[in-house]
């Protein structure tokens, strides 16, 4: 199962976010923070790949709006239909995308996350 996680503090780390999921009993296989290509700064959202069968809907509701470093996170499942549509529609679905991000950098991140090539 793949998730979109938004409203992440800019100083957050992958380890801290993995602990946040683990505290709720969920195993994370990979976290893909979205960063500015030039400065490396976090944009405040990421994609998460869950281990096993993922998260039941009840668990997803539990995680959505739960506090992480004092901020309520937005946690949404990425459906296979949305994932197949391509970069432009993913960008629209995950709006707002930071204005500083280039189409090329977003494609590189999204395609690497989807396991494809840009």
Image (tube, helix red, strand yellow):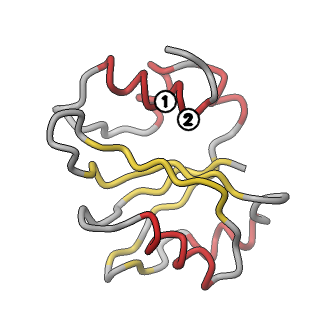
In this rendering, the answer to whether 44 lies above or below 92 is below
SS for tag 1? helix
Residue ID at (47%, 34%): 93
Rounded to the nearest whole Å, what is the CA distance between mark 2 and mark 1?
5 Å
Describe residue 17's horizontal placement relative to residue 86 as left or right. Answer: left
Q: Quadrant of residue 102?
A: top left
Q: Position of residue 3 (x, y in %)?
A: 60, 51
Residue ID at (71%, 72%): 59
Residue ID at (64%, 70%): 61
Please, which residue is most extreme toward the right here? Answer: 53
Q: Nearer the viewer, residue 40 or 87?
A: 40
Q: Position of residue 113 (x, y in %)?
A: 55, 35
Q: Nearer the viewer, residue 71 or 23?
A: 23
Describe residue 21's horizontal placement relative to residue 79 as left or right. Answer: left
Q: Position of residue 18 (x, y in %)?
A: 54, 70
Describe residue 84's horizontal placement relative to residue 55 as left or right. Answer: left
At label 2, counting other C-alpha atoms closer than 10 Å, the crowd grade (few under 14, some 14-19, many 20 or more) is: some
Q: Which mark is residue 32?
A: none
Q: Which residue is mark 2?
A: 113
Q: Nearer the viewer, residue 87 or 34?
A: 34
Describe residue 105's horizontal placement relative to residue 82 as left or right. Answer: left
Q: Quadrant of residue 37?
A: top left
At label 1, counting other C-alpha atoms closer than 10 Å, the crowd grade (few under 14, some 14-19, many 20 or more) is: many
Residue ID at (69%, 57%): 50
SS for tag 2? helix
In this rendering, the answer to whether 39 lies above or below 56 is above
Count of residue discs: 2
Q: Which residue is mark 1?
A: 110
Q: Mark 2–mark 1 contact, CB under 8 Å? A: yes
């Amino acid at each position: 199962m793949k998730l979109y996680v938004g409203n992440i503090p800019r100083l957050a780390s992958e380890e801290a976010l993995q602990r946040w999921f683990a505290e709720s009993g969920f195993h994370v296989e990979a976290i893909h923070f979205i960063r500015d290509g030039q400065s490396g700064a976090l944009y405040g959202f990421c994609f998460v790949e869950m281990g096993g069968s993922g998260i039941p809907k009840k668990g997803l509701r539990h995680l959505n709006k739960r506090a992480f470093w004092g901020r309520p996170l937005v946690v949404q499942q990425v459906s296979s239909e949305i994932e197949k549509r391509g970069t432009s529609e993913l960008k629209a679905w995950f709006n707002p995308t930071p204005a500083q991000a280039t189409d090329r950098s977003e494609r590189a991140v999204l395609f690497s996350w989807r396991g494809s090539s840009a």
